Amino acid sequence: MNRREFLTSASATAAAAGAAVTAPAVFSPAKAQARNETLLIVSESGPNNLDIHGVGTNVPGYEASWNCYDRLITHPMKEVNGTPYYDKDKFEGELAEDMNIGDMSVTFKLKKDATFQDGTPVTAKDVKWSLDRSVSVGGFPTFQMKAGSLEKPEQFVVVDDRTIRVDFIRKDRLTIPDLAVIVPCVINSELVKKNATAQDPWGLEYTKQNTAGSGAYKVTKWTPGTEVIFERYDNWKGGPLPKIKRVIWRMVPSAGNRRALLERGDADISYDLPNKDFMELKSNPKLNIISTPYSNGVQYIGMNVTRPPFNNPKVRQAMAYAVPYQKIMDAVMFGLAKPMFGASPESKTEVAWPQPTKYNTDLAKAKALLAEAGYPDGFETTISFDLGFAGVNEPLCILLQESLAQIGIKTTINKIPGANWRTELNKKELPLFTNVFSGWLDYPEYFFFWCYHGSNSVFNTMSYQSAAMDTFIDGARTAAAGGDKAAYDTDVRGMVDLAFADAPRLPLFQPYVNVAMQKNVTGYEYWFHRRLDYRALQKG
Amino acid sequence: MLKLIGSRLATAIPSLIGVVIVTFLLTRVLPGDTAAYFAGPAATPQAIAEIRTKLGLDKPLPTQFVDYVSALSKGDLGTSLSTGQSVAHEIATRLPASAELTLCGLIFALLIAVPFGIAAAVKQGSWIDHACRLITTAGVSLPVFFTGLLLVYLFYFRLGWAPAPLGRLDVFFSAPETVTGFYLIDSLLAGDLETFRAAAAQLVVPTLTLAIFALAPIARITRASMLHVLSSEFIRTARASGLTSKTVILTYAFRNAMLPVVTTLGMVFSFLLGANVLVEKVFAWPGIGSYAVEALITSDFAPVQGFVLAMAILYVALNLIIDLAYGIIDPRARSEA
């Protein structure tokens, strides 16, 4: 009996037992009161650094940064399928009360009474120091800032104590959205400078362990790998005072136990359970499950186009017809993903990304295309995947292997441990692989620039080179910056069509962010970073 | 006695030096690229290079080794990248968690396994002997994560007797002030009975899980060793002299049968301490085993080196204690040393 079967039987018997299962007597009455204002989150892994500017901060660390620091601006919410979803086209002030966009600069006026968690007021000096820091520390934060053409400290100018101007080095439609991502957070510069050293002028060692922001929460206790405790900052000015006073985030490595904790009502929220568990939990009346597609994210099959056999577009198209799309949706994702295949042949290409291809599983067509390409008897190759996400990747690759075998393509599966995956991907030598890419900034040209452009970024995992594609992508970027809607639409349609026809990578599906919570927990919001925003959550 | 301790420690030094060199080299030949891993999903080659420089991984191996050894001599085991904490601090906080759990499991296993083994040997071929065989076989063949999950399912999910499997303490308790790092002891020292009860409650199910696993080798060795001793001549003599069977078994036979049991005990303890990763995972226990495995998966060198070194030191200490225990149990072992 494996864990899955165990859990199936667990939930079945639990349903049968029904009311026989009483609440555990873990909490004394005094503690029950505390529990109403406390949120218990369980997840597989926790942060390794509380500061997103740190060296190698992992994704859970982004969640700490998001909730403990403020940005100048943020996105308001809109409703998508009944769930609050960030509105990528709109901005509102978080620390700024006013934003004034000029031709080659943007000016922010800070909120008058905003203070850091130690009581000192937030000034334009702090904002400049923080933005300087994000473009100077190197690594991921600097890279993310560059994506919005925010590159040099000289771009950030203190006008007066409460006014800061950001100068543009070039027109780029991503500059303003890039100021609302997690990285450009505002840090208490005096406090951090006090704790900086000569070797560490930006005080990264201090902010790794301590939060020094003006955000709605502060970390009061952090035991790496075990738990993080957040307390509300009652004087927060970034928005309405959050309802939850205390957030306890516990790391529970066993997915089975996370599910048990949810079903028993001990944990309030969990969000990284296997798809199968989420699907089964949907029928649990005590829990609320919210699934939202990753914004600007696609799981795909990539092919190295620099070498035979995948340098031949016919072979790639044959592959596109050989992928068992629907089986993957059913048996791997349990329906918890948005299909990115099988659009009707008459449908027109939209100015949007992601959007489904017109490919469907058609082995006869695949075999014919393969013969046309000069491989009537198929060939041998390897399929590689990241073991860090084996829950999805492994069954997906096995289904693909099975399907390819039917058109004569013999494959061996190459499992690569999480630590090596990126190294292997960067070498750009894997012939056939599956991977996910998702961008924080939700714009088609942003996705295509990283994944298809001839500048061959890390994410152009196929080493795809096409002059026509580059023209479309560069054209779309220029058109977006200049506000030329007609040219932009043509270019986006052009790049999507070319990407589908040339098929260097085969989109499979848009994965979902799945969050399971108790019925009394409300206020979940979907954000581009896909982590939890504690500020809107409430209990009761 | 002091001479024995001294000579034992002296022989341990070369092996510790060996451990330092071998773990350093082994972690460096691991295929993963630490810098690429920690540069994040959106890293450019330049960003990866910057991180590599920051971590000192761009220096030649001998230089890295000298850096490592000189830091080590100052008691600095380096910093873990995946948790962001100093390795020495992490090991100091996690080792007691593992040790507390392992000791509880081992004591529990001993209390059951030793009497069971003795009874099985004395009444060889009886139902108790068969029961012993059955239980020990089941104990070794059921993987700990399975027994762990099964017990959680039964005692937490179905019956609601056990607290939520959320590590060493329930979320609404705070840890007692650290003296030994063992929550049971620390909470008693602080006079906080409520925390003691909470910590003990969290310990019950994982202890049971470990005990089921540790029971098997101890019971089997006790049985085998007792059988061997019971068939020897001095036992026959003792019986012939009319001593009660209680005196014969406990005073004469068991004391002589204890040496192999103690040896096994030492092995089981050190094995469990490093290898109860799965139990730690199931119960979200902040122990040292899961720490080392996670570090290994992310190519995080410093914790792996620190873990191996800590384990090596522990083995040396444990073997020393066992050697000393030999001398107490059997004076002949003392004179031979």
Image (spheres, rainbow, N blue to C red):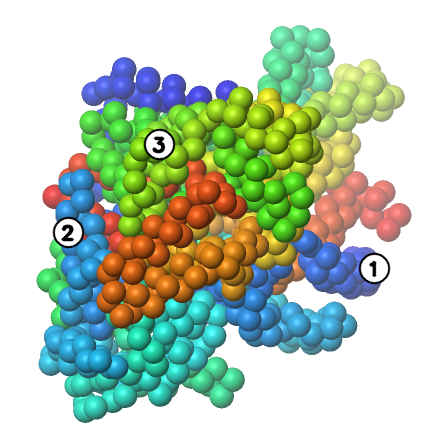
Whether marks 2 and 1 lie on the same chain: no
Snapshot quadrant of residue B161: top left
- The vertical placement of B190 against B142, above or below, is below
- The answer, for residue A417, to whether it is visible in the render is no
Foreground of the two, A335 or A367? A367
Indicate the chain on which mark 1 is placed.
Answer: B
Q: Position of residue A237 (x, y in %)?
A: 14, 70
Q: Position of residue A296 (x, y in %)?
A: 34, 51
Report how far apart the C-alphas of labels 1 and 3 lie in the structure.
77 Å
Type of the residue with mark 3: Pro
- The vertical placement of A500 against B33, above or below, is above
- Left or right: A362 in relation to A443: right
Q: What element carries label 1?
A: helix
Q: Mark 1 points at which residue?
A: B11
Indicate the chain on which mark 3 is placed.
Answer: A
Q: Where is residue B241 in the image (x, y as percent from the top left)?
A: 81, 18
Nearest-to-viewer mark from 2 and 1 = 2
Q: Mark 3 points at which residue?
A: A345
- The answer, for residue A377, to whether it is visible in the render is yes
Residue drawn at x 76%, y 58% as measured from the top left: B22
Type of the residue with mark 1: Thr
Type of the residue with mark 2: Lys
Residue drawn at x 31%, y 55% as measured from the top left: A490
Q: Which residue lies furthest to the top in this view?
A: B126
Whether marks 1 and 3 lie on the same chain: no
Residue A78: mark: 2
